[in-house]
Image (cartoon, rainbow, N blue to C red):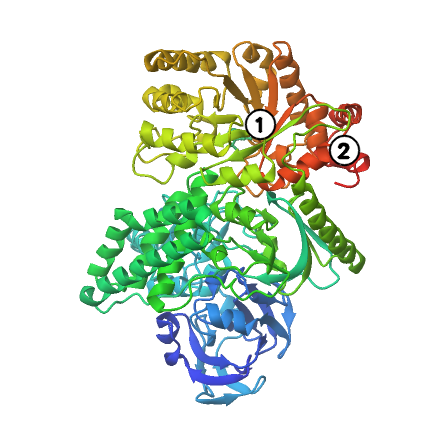
Amino acid sequence: MTAITLAAPLAGWAMPLAEVPDPAFAQGLVGTGMAIDPTVNELRSPCDGVVLSVHRARHACTLQAASGAEVLLHLGVDTVGLNGDGFTAHVRDGQAVKTGDLLIGFDMDLVGSRAQSLVSMMVVVNDGFTVDGQSVNREIAVGEPAMTVHGGSGADAAAPPATPDSDETGERSVVLPIANGLHARPAAALVAATKAYPGTVTIHCRDRSANAKSVVALMGLGTVLGDRLTVRAAGPGAQDMAVSIAVLIEGGLGDPVVDTASAPAATAAAPVVATPASPATGPSAQPAEEIGPPFAPGEEVLLKGTIAVPGQAVGSVVRRFRSTVRVAEEGAGPAVEEPRLHRALDSVIAELGRSAERMPEHAAIFQAHRELLDDPELLDGALADIRAGKSAEWAWQRTARLQADALAALADPRMAERAADLRDLEQQVLAALSGKAPSIGLADLPAGSIVLADEILPSDLAGVPAGRLAGIGMAHGGPTSHAVILAAALGVPTVVALGRQAERVPDGAPVVIDGNRGELLVFPPEDMLATTRTAVAARAARREENRRSAGEECRMADGTRIEVFANLGRVSDAPGAVVEGAEGCGLLRTEFLFLERQSAPTEDEQHRQYQQIADALEGRPLVIRTLDVGGDKPLSYLPLPKEENPVLGLRGVRVGLREPELLRAQIRAILRVKPAGACRIMVPMIASPSELLAVRGMVDEERAKLGRAEPIELGAMIEVPSAALIADRIGAVADFLSIGTNDLTQYVLAMDRGNPHVAAQLDALHPGVLRLIRLAVTGAKTHDRTVAVCGGSASDPMAAPLLIGLGVTELSATPAVIADLKAFIRTLRMEDCRRVAEAALATDSADEVRRLVAQAWPAI
Ligand code: PEP
Ligand code: MG
């Protein structure tokens, strides 16, 4: 029997475990030891030993002392949910350490403000050891003797458990429903449930297994929400044991149960240590990942994401990674909690009204939030929890998260964005309940801030003072989210889907955000910062200049006419687009009118909106795209089957043909717009001429019923590869073609446009995409049809000369870039565009294409 003294790993107030504000630790379920409320930000080794594991969230690590004692050092309470934010590990698994070596550094302000408590625990977690002599209820300095551990001798401690006198075995499989995996608290609960069992219990996950009687081993499994675990027991009553452990896991082991049916399941092949990029789903559905230490000054790093709002900016990083809000579960009873929830909801609704007044052009977004708050399922779910004794905070958070997770689990990026709206509302209502400001704190930004966040939400942007926010980088998020629409309105360059490596960028780091390329350059060299600053200032001056001539028609330097239109999503976008120089609307995404509602807009409602947009365009053409929703963008009121691969299923025109009444009502609403020539109809996701012919049949019938004599132009979107390949056949039945490069690129490259893992390679300038665009143009020309581009590459200045060189004559872009785009096109000559486009078709990659364009037009 040996005894070792453990030194204090932190300075601060030493306290008995019983005082820790976490029942699992306080009741000694995790292990025996003590706690320290720290006054320093470095966790040091309490003994000589070996690091058994550093938790992937970097908030805890376990050491094995020479005696075999396993010591868990756990920083703060409920810090696993920070997913590593604010923690820097200085050691690795398997590393030998000496007493006093630095193990983990942490940002006290960040962790202190986002965790339930900073109180940190040091406990011995394995059997065969006892602890005494805890030096508590006093200030303690790092390295001072803190407690004594008796027992063990290395070899004994590692000895396998005695084999029980039974060869019964039991096995059960279960999906882990715990948001942060088997972290300290659930691991301790599992150990408590298995400890007295005379046989063995092991938990298997992917290719790893752990003794279910060891907190360290269970934490070391690196499990995440949605993992499939196999419980194996051996010994007397093993089958019952396996079943009861599986039932306990299904019950959350003391943590809230997350609905894994709606959360994305971890795949069997998923690595324990994850790759840098991560899915765009929300934080609650996001498995924790080891992302590495913060980037250090001088470490020049390029992070690639997805273009959301074009433009460049230089500035200093302000980190705003959102953490989960800790709430008390138990309430003061329905009589108190119900009115509290209603008051909080009322105050958020009132604030939404004020936001709508501050940003009237985006009132629809705040109205959509309001409708979400009115959702009876959300309120009923929360009220049911309150009536079961929960607090208003707990009930609201649980219900909002369940619904947000369900939305995020739908493969459609726009639904994931609605999930982001719900998470926004979750935070706002919690803030209203606590009386604190709801936003992530963008109201007091210093000038020149580049905000990095997991996801910025619309409410965060509503209070941003003008001119302070220079750029936005989001780890997650999609380029069409409401927040991105607001960022575009503010003219703030934005890059989304940067992946979790963005979390490694420290506060205050100088960065260049490039919304034209979808890049974030961290710690750029001084000279580059200076040149980019000059370039940004020059661009701002040039943009002002360009806006002065934006209203004039767009002709290339050699006189070739190129039309530059705007993509619109709602009535309020139209007047601004005209001011920016839009010569019409080349794509009205009508699905914005259909989403976030309980029922389809009536024909009259649609007609009113189309008419208002046509009026705002003052005679300029308006291309209205018929509804592009489907399996991946379900409408609650549209009965469509659930699909395995919704992006390859019922979408776009396929839905319209399956639900003809919906499509016919939309067609009638368009046909009624006055004057008769104001609108054209465009059909999404055309794969074959027959689909367009079917729609044409409906248009002709509805036109006859309305007694409208004038024909209406009917165009096909080219966004399915087959449509590009047989554009000559589609051109025979369409009046015009418009290429949707967003979908065309996703289908040609087989890369999901909403998946940040592939966002960096998802480039519409890939020569494969360009070759299809040429085929589409050539096919259309055989029937003398015009070809437009309305996908994202129409807003990419690098793409413009190539598209024009390939024969595209109309670009429909996001309004904010139109003035600059027109000015640039005015400098181009067709022969140069053709030459560079030809060369681009003969390259191997989008990067090569971009280099060619940069060489030909260095000023872009
Ligand atoms: C496209 O796919 O390029 C397009 C314009 O349509 P959406 O982005 O709305 O799918
Ligand atoms: Mg599309």
Dot 1 amino acid type: Leu
**Mark 1 near ligand 1 (CB under 8 Å)?**
yes
Viewer-proximal residue, 130 or 502? 502
Between marks 1 and 2 in the image, the one whose residue lies nearer the viewer: 2
> In 3D space, how far apart are the residues under numbered discs 1 and 2 (Cα atoms)?
28 Å
Tell me the residue at 62%/79% (across/down).
99
Percent position of residue 244, x then y: 29, 54
Residue 793 placement, left or right of 5: right
**Mark 2 near ligand 1 (CB under 8 Å)?**
no
For marks 1 and 2, the one nearer the N-term is 1
| Residue 523 vertical position relative to residue 568 in the rendered view, above or below | below
Tell me the residue at 57%/71% (across/down).
106
Viewer-proximal residue, 413 or 46? 413
Q: Are marks 1 and 2 in contact (CB under 8 Å)?
A: no
Percent position of residue 809, x then y: 65, 23
Percent position of residue 659, x then y: 34, 22
Tell me the residue at 25%/67% (across/down).
331
**Circle 1: element type:** helix
Dot 2 amino acid type: Thr
**Circle 2: element type:** loop
| Residue 385 vertical position relative to residue 789 in the rendered view, above or below | below
Residue wearing tag 1: 744
| Residue 374 vertical position relative to residue 642 in the rendered view, above or below | below
The residue lying furthest to the bottom in this view is: 138
